[in-house]
Amino acid sequence: MTTTTSTAPLSDDEIRRIRADFPILGESVNGRPLVYLDSGATSQRPRTVLDAEREFAEHRNSAVHRGAHTLAAEATEEFEQARERIAGFVGVGADEVVWTANATAGLNLVAYALSNAAVQEEPAMRELALEPGDEILVTELEHHANLVPWQQLALRTGAVLRFIPVDDDGALVLDELDALLGERTRVVALAHVSNVIGTVSPIAPVIARAREVGALVVLDACQSAPQLPLDLRALDVDLAVFSGHKMLGPSGVGVLAGRREILAALPPVTTGGSVITRVTMERSEFLPPPQRFEAGTQPVSQAVGLAAAVDYLESLGMDRVAAHERELGAQMVDGLAAIPGVRVLRGAPGAERVGLASFALEGVHAHDLGQFLDDRGIAIRVGHHCAQPLHRRLGLTATARMSAAVYTTAEEVELALAAVRDAAGFFGVRA
């Protein structure tokens, strides 16, 4: 497949051709053409992804890494080729990609592995163990998947959870970084892109300070992997997670990507078949990463489908995908801000954004607003978006969220903005 290196925005003709690749976009909802603006929660899949999964199931479905027959060998080869394609997409080696069920599973894997480190025999593993008084640093922007596992790790180890706060705009307050990071900081875990505000977090200074104190850096790339060029080596993170279903791929598959020396020092969490080299009745010895973390039957057809999704994105060019979604994000924010009674969560002035905008309509519950738009065939996300602390900090219980993908058009965003304007009138909102 040809990969473009252009940075020009996607043209209208290209968007039309892209949309033709996604069968579901031809559906109607409540008698209206579907306007799908919920890709931040789950994106849609092009035919190439659907075909890749089906073709694998019809012609090569078999257990990987355990069969001695031809079909099993073919399935294993395709499974590992998928790993290589994902690794290339994020700038790491194939041995640095671990298949998980999703990003949440990847973050839990890391948190549980760290708490298992204390009971391991290997010194390199024990060095990763947290002790009472050690610190884990997150941000107030995190969604629950990158917060709750660290809370639980703190409970299991006696570590202390600290966080970088946000200001009234939802921007990270980095002035407090020096006070928050110190010699007891063992883990720094943060989102690359906020799933609520849509801003690209200024992670470089945080990572630089984490390096100075020797902390492990974990990146939640759920919202950046589908929308931005991603080079984990250049970002200098130790571990990163993302989910297939948010980047045009299947559900049930995700990725934990990590430095091979870090993965080699992390003990296994889920144990059983496929992760061992030798088992006696008393003890077991484990394979090196990534297989050490892939016990049991893996999501093979989903991995093949995710590789097809990566091929699709790369054929468009991630710079162009990013430019397209940046334009839509600006259109959303500017359009919403112009509607009387709407409060848009936009982060710091001039902050880099992706194609996502959360907002509240004065006096109208987000669920009522979502229902109003759904009646017009417009699908958006409503609620706290698994980020209750952030909503609480900003004085909100829930928001509505529009989010785009490569198949989203400016006309669709205008339809949604018009529906929000009409909702303001319908509910009697006054500026």
Image: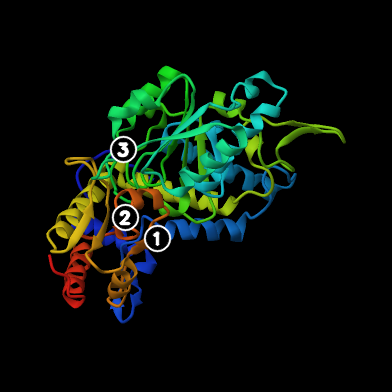
Q: Secondary structure at mark 3?
A: loop
Say whether marks 2 and 1 touch (CB < 8 Å).
Answer: yes
Q: Residue sitting at 35 percent across and 48 percent down? A: 390
Q: Secondary structure at mark 2?
A: loop
Does residue 369 appear to the left or right of 11 in the view shown? right
Residue 234 visible somewhere in the drawing: no
Residue 196 coordinates in the image, percent (x, y): 33, 51
Does residue 103 appear to the left or right of 230 in the view shown? right
- The amino acid type, in three-letter code, at marker 1 is Gln
> 10 Å neighbourhood of mark 3: few (<14), some, or many (≥20)?
some
Residue 405's disc is 2
Does residue 420 appear to the left or right of 158 in the view shown? left
Determine which residue is flagged by label 3: 201
Count of numbered circles in the view: 3
Residue 44's disc is 1
- The amino acid type, in three-letter code, at marker 3 is Ser
Q: Residue sitting at 63 percent across and 20 percent down? A: 124
Query: Which quadrant of the view contains residue 139?
Result: top left
Q: Residue sitting at 33 percent across and 76 percent down? A: 28
- The amino acid type, in three-letter code, at marker 2 is Ala
In front here: 345 or 25? 345
Residue 357 coordinates in the image, percent (x, y): 26, 54
Kindly report which numbered mark, 3 or 1, lies closer to the viewer in this rendering.
Answer: 3
- Relative height, residue 197 to residue 289 (above, below): below
Residue 409 coordinates in the image, percent (x, y): 23, 60
